[in-house]
Amino acid sequence: MSLFAISREAGPSWIDGKGAFDQPAVNDHGAFMNNLAAEGLVLFAGPLAGSEHDRIRVLLIADAASETELRQRLADDPWERTQQLVTTSVEPWNLVVGADRLGAQRSAP
């Protein structure tokens, strides 16, 4: 498995003037993300500070076999399907500092 940093942001269906927790289907989105975390696919996820009050921007750290797998899984997010949220980038990430805290047995390149 490999680590990835994923950026997501409010899409064209995001309702301006409403924060993340006031958007339609917030509970469905939350359940979906919690399931990905329970499976071990998403390790960390959350809005960049303050963005949850307006047009959200989110950072995820995920552990997956490939970028393709991540994009396929995130495409099933209720918010992605309705374009409330869009995935703007998926990049391989090399964890150097703090790997021991994750229990990861990764070494620097």
Image (spheres, helix red, strand yellow):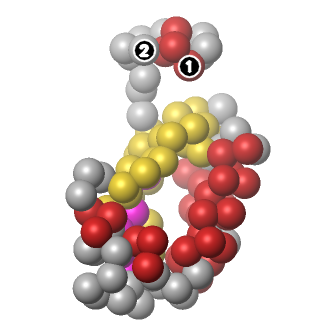
Where is the N terminus found, in terms of image quarters? top right
Q: In this view, does 103 lie to the left or right of 46?
A: right
Q: Is residue 107 shown above or below 95?
A: above
- Residue numbers of the magenta segment: 6-11
The overriding secondary structure of the stretch rendered in magenta is strand
Secondary structure state at the residue bearing disc 1? helix
Residue 7 position, x and y percent, is: 37, 56
Residue 106 is a magenta residue: no
Q: Which mark is residue 87?
A: none
Is 10 part of what is drawn in magenta?
yes
Tag shown at residue 102: 1
Q: Crowdedness of circle 2 by 10 Å Cα count: few (<14), some, many (20+)?
A: few
Which amino acid, by three-letter code, is at mark 1? Answer: Leu
Image disc number at residue 98: 2
Q: Where is residue 96 in the image (x, y as percent from the top left)?
A: 39, 16
Percent x, y of residue 73: 66, 62
Name the residue furthest front: 22
How many angstroms separate mark 2 from mark 1 (CA)? 7 Å
Residue 12: tell me if it is visible.
no
User: Which one is in front, 17 or 93?
Assistant: 17
- Dot 1: few (<14), some (14–19), or many (≥20) neighbours within 10 Å? few
Residue sitting at 42 percent across and 26 percent down?
Answer: 94
- Going by the numbered disc 2, the residue's amino acid type is Gly
Q: Residue at x 26, y 74 (%)?
A: 54
Report the front residue among 10 and 31. Answer: 31
- Determine whether label 2 and label 1 are within 8 Å by CB: yes
Q: In which quarter of the image is residue 33?
A: bottom right
User: At 60% from the left edge and 45% from the top edge, which residue is drawn?
Assistant: 42
Between 41 and 65, the one nearer to me in the picture: 41
Q: In which quarter of the image is residue 13?
A: bottom left
